[in-house]
Image (spheres, grey):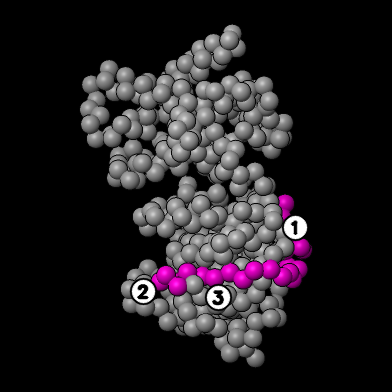
């Protein structure tokens, strides 16, 4: 018997909690290589409402971690972990063993090695889950929300992810984050989200509130679509507009979503002008139809954040429009490139506030992030895009 195990009543309580807040369990996998814990993995199939696999541990929380006083506020000493995989993930392949490099968890600046190996295309997320679940008891360490894992090299040839961050689970309620055992003790649920080295660097240099916001990372769900991790093929990144709002401490006044207004306007213009790639049309036909028939019923800012990883990439465009977008809309401040589109957006916003006698002194030259995304705003900017597109065609 494992050194740390739930009682039958505790195990049933954990299972009931998972079913209630994450979905019906379709498969249970016992982690045989774990001697210290009676560790199981529950697999929850994709549904229409939750179009992704959910894999959750059960048994990790039988061990009570020794959390330092500085981290006890807001963190629990018993936790279970979960991970989300895209609905087209090879779930059978995810549970095959592989060999590769060992990851480490950064705790207070030092790296704690984890057990197991991570390599194969499909199973590296599951191996990460197994490694992390055993780390506290085997290494007498602890996990709290915000711990960052960094292996420095990608987990697999299929991904750029080289580390991970622990965070409150997405796609559930606050009630789903904590399970109360029969004796009153609480077990927290944390999501492990693999991230790239670029995202690790961002996380290390931003304030705690932003680290756990979904806009900073590629997504809460792990995909095999390689282009989602291609930072070389982006013509606009919402984080480039959101980060200054945080750094200037004006995000409360502007609102986070408004940093994506101009991207939503551009995407709507592209959709309405039939400028999308075949792959985009096939994957998002429902959203395209909604944009064309009742645009007021879809918020493309959330679509960009949730489906396009907060970025606009050339892959979503058909070949006929790419040159225009590159010449008018490419935004890459690191390379000293800011397209005319952003000058047009900034000028429009400044004129709007001046014409309405609204003081912009506290907007830190980010007036375009304080605009409301109204139908009139879209029509005005769409007209500007039309004019520039016509000029481009005539050249």
Question: How busy is the neighbourhood of tag 3: few (under 14 within 10 Å), some, or many (20 plus)?
Answer: some
Residue 51 in the image: state x and y as whole percent.
65, 51
Q: Are marks 3 and 1 in contact (CB under 8 Å)?
A: no
Could you tell me which secondary element the residue under label 2 belongs to? Answer: loop
Q: Which dot, 3 or 1, sits closer to the camera?
A: 3
Q: Earlier in the sequence, mark 3 or mark 2?
A: 2
Residue at image position (67%, 64%) is: 124
Quadrant of the rendered structure where residue 307 is? top right
Could you tell me which secondary element the residue under label 3 belongs to? Answer: strand
Q: Which residue is mark 3?
A: 113
Q: CA distance from mark 2 to mark 1?
A: 38 Å
- 252 inside magenta stretch: no
From the viewer's perspective, tell me whether residue 254 is left or right of residue 27.
Answer: left
Residue at image position (62%, 50%) is: 49
Residue 39 in the image: state x and y as whole percent.
63, 79
Quadrant of the rendered structure where residue 276 is? top right
Residue 328 in the image: state x and y as whole percent.
52, 22
Q: Which residue is mark 2?
A: 72
Viewer-closest of 236 and 56: 236
Instruction: Please give the label number shown on residue 90.
Output: 1
Residue at image position (38%, 53%) is: 206
Q: Earlier in the sequence, mark 3 or mark 1?
A: 1
């Amino acid at each position: 018997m494992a050194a740390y195990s739930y009682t039958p009543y505790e195990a049933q309580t954990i299972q009931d909690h998972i079913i209630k807040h994450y979905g019906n369990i379709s498969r249970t996998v016992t982690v045989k290589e774990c001697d210290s814990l009676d560790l199981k993995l529950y697999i929850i199939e994709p549904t229409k409402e939750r179009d992704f696999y959910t894999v959750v541990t059960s048994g990790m929380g039988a061990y009570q971690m020794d959390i330092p006083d500085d981290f006890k506020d807001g963190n629990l000493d018993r936790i279970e972990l979960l991970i989300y995989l895209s609905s087209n993930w090879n779930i059978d392949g995810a549970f095959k063993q592989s060999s590769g490099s060992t990851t480490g968890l950064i705790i207070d600046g030092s790296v704690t090695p984890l057990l197991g190996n991570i390599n194969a295309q499909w199973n590296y997320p599951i191996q990460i889950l197994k490694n992390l679940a055993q780390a506290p008891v085997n290494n007498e360490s602890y996990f709290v929300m915000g711990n960052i894992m960094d292996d420095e090299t990608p987990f697999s040839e299929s991904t750029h992810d080289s580390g991970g961050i622990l965070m409150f689970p997405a796609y559930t309620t606050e009630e789903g984050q904590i399970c109360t055992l029969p004796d009153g003790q609480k077990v927290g649920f944390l999501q492990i989200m693999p991230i790239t080295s670029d995202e690790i660097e961002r996380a290390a240099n931003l304030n705690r509130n932003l680290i756990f916001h979904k806009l900073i990372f590629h997504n809460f769900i792990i995909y095999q679509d390689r282009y989602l991790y291609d930072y070389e093929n982006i013509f606009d990144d919402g984080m480039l507009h959101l980060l200054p709002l945080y750094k200037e401490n004006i995000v409360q006044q502007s609102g986070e979503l408004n940093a994506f207004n101009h991207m939503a306007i551009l995407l709507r213009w592209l959709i309405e002008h039939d400028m999308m790639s075949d792959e985009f049309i096939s994957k998002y036909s429902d959203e395209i139809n909604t944009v064309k028939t009742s645009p007021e019923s879809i918020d493309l800012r959330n679509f960009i954040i949730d489906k396009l990883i907060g970025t606009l990439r050339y892959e979503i465009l058909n070949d006929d429009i790419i040159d225009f977008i590159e010449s008018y809309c490419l935004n890459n401040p690191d390379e000293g490139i800011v397209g005319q589109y952003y000058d047009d957006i900034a000028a429009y916003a400044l004129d709007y506030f001046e014409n309405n006698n609204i003081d912009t002194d506290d907007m830190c030259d980010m007036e375009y992030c304080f605009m409301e995304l109204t139908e009139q705003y879209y029509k005005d900017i769409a007209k500007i895009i039309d004019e520039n597109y016509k000029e481009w065609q005539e050249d």
